[in-house]
Image (cartoon, helix red, strand yellow):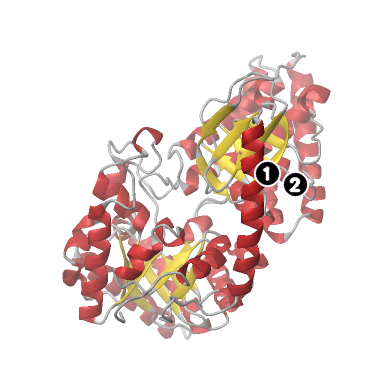
Amino acid sequence: MPATVELRGRAAAPGLARGPVHRIVDIADLQRQSGTPGDERIALESAIETATADLATLIADASSDGADILEFQVAMLEDEALREPALVSIDSGADAASAWSATVAEQIAIYRAGDDSYFSARASDLEDLRDRVLSHLLGAGAQQDIQPGAILIGRDLTPSRFLAIDWSKGGAIALSDGSPSSHVAMLARSRGVPMTVGLGRIPAATFAEAIVDGERGRLLLDPAADDVASYTAALGEAATRVAQEAVVLKQAAMTRDRQPVAVLINVAEPEELNTIDPAICDGIGLVRTEFLFDRPGGLPDEETQYRAYAHIMQWAAGRPVTIRTIDAGGDKPVPGLTQDGETNPFLGMRGIRLSLAKPDIFGVQLRALARAAVHGDLRIMLPMITVPEEITAAAALLDAAVAQLQAENVSAKRPKLGIMVEVPAVAIVPELFKEAAFFSIGSNDLTQYVTASARDNAAVADLNDAGHPAVRAMIAHVAKTGRALNIDVSLCGDMGGDPRHLPVLIAAGLRSVSVAPPLVGRVKLALRDIDGGPSA
């Protein structure tokens, strides 16, 4: 039997799975025999038309979250601006497959510019529509039958491929690239499909079976008997834990000494809420509004934003909802908004800095938020705050937006205006920012800046540790200052969903965390084993 190969990457969807290996063929690497330019033009147009029909069929059978993802792809395929460069290339002698691949590759490169960011994860959607068209251009060589319960391994997986697979009999995903924030990862989490990403180069050898540990980001290829025994034991432990989580899922969260803790959820897209019962959480601690700005058609208008925010408020049914203003820039480029060519984008024009530099665009978002605020307890959160003057400037724009709406006889309300605490300058002297209605600690960026280690760089992953004493000290200081100033303090980074860090957060005095929806039960269960100590 071949030696076991173990690879470690990043957890994208929790769970454990064992099954036969299915290697994902990269369709873009296949070749097509070229015909005349006229023939190739007809072939491409026909493939796009067929791919669009395929997507329409999938949309009809998909749940709402999957349908919305696929509708984005249909809109892209119907956009003449996307196919035109490919047709020009065909007229110059390229075959349809090469021309289409090169054209979409340019768009993918733009989306991938930020590595593991939310926006770069959208590149998988472009790859998806690229590959669907290519599969029709390349014929049978692009088709793949997937055995039920298979472990899919490869460079990346696109959403429509994921949705075309029957996961009812098990299976898992292990990718050399990929992102925990990709649409595929979101779909995997919502359907209970274990997934790990960022594994690096997967050996090209043939493997019979594999084990995926979505909890720890591990892949075992051709596992040994001891590995299988450990997997079986872990599977039993996981089943017990899931049952325990289900018991507490809709119960109020509290520590062992019965101190209440608010457990809220983080939301990247409204579609995530379609399969979530509001009763499991105390509200939404973070809505990432970037989902509105990476869709076809350019920057979203006021009405588009208002409808999205109002939908979220209606789901919350009176529970508090904290919506973060657009956190573009850095590793999240937005055409028409962000700046190109920054030498150090993480320290450049991003978050509130960019919003204040584009008051017309920012004003549209503030108007939409003020309108949605009439539907419940909406709170606005400003990202990347560094100096108090940024809060003052944003507050003035918000006040102006509310005044304009009232003058227009449009129903609106001024929401509370709080800030992300993710820049060390704020965490060190939070008392300077008492104009904020609340603090929400963004542990991901705070850790990145405090440890000077990019969170998406595997080479410095060991340094990017939310448990670093300096990070913990800053969080404790912010929590203590917040209590002294009577300012609510929460935490919305990944640290809050990790049971290993919860004792530190509770000891620091935090009594509110916002986590990924699948982790709510796990967090509530873990809190029951932690003493809160003196009341915060």
Is 430 on the left or on the right of 209, as rendered? Answer: left
Is residue 157 among what the camera can see? no
Is 465 on the left or on the right of 150, as rendered? Answer: left
The disc placed on residue 248 is: none
Distance (Cα) linking label 2 and label 1: 7 Å
Residue situated in front as seen by the camera: 361 or 458: 458
**Which circle's residue, 2 or 1, is located before the other in the chain?**
1
The x and y percentages for residue 159 are 67, 44
Residue situated in front as seen by the camera: 318 or 522: 522
Image vertical order of residue 431 relative to residue 499, above or below: below
10 Å crowding of disc 2: few (<14), some (14-19), many (20+): some
Badge 1 amino acid:
Ala
Q: Specify the quadrant that holds the N terminus.
A: top right
The x and y percentages for residue 181 are 52, 49
Image vertical order of residue 279 relative to residue 92, above or below: below
Mark 2 lies on a secondary structure that is: loop
10 Å crowding of disc 1: few (<14), some (14-19), many (20+): many
Badge 2 amino acid:
Gly
Residue situated in front as seen by the camera: 261 or 129: 261
Residue of label 2:
170
**CB atoms at circles 2 and 1 under 8 Å apart?**
yes
The x and y percentages for residue 125 are 62, 42
Mark 1 lies on a secondary structure that is: strand
The x and y percentages for residue 249 are 59, 72
Is residue 395 among what the camera can see? yes
Image vertical order of residue 275 relative to residue 223, above or below: below
Residue of label 1:
17
Tell me the residue at 34%/75% (across/down): 417
Residue situated in front as seen by the camera: 227 or 449: 227
Q: Specify the quadrant that holds the C terminus.
A: bottom left
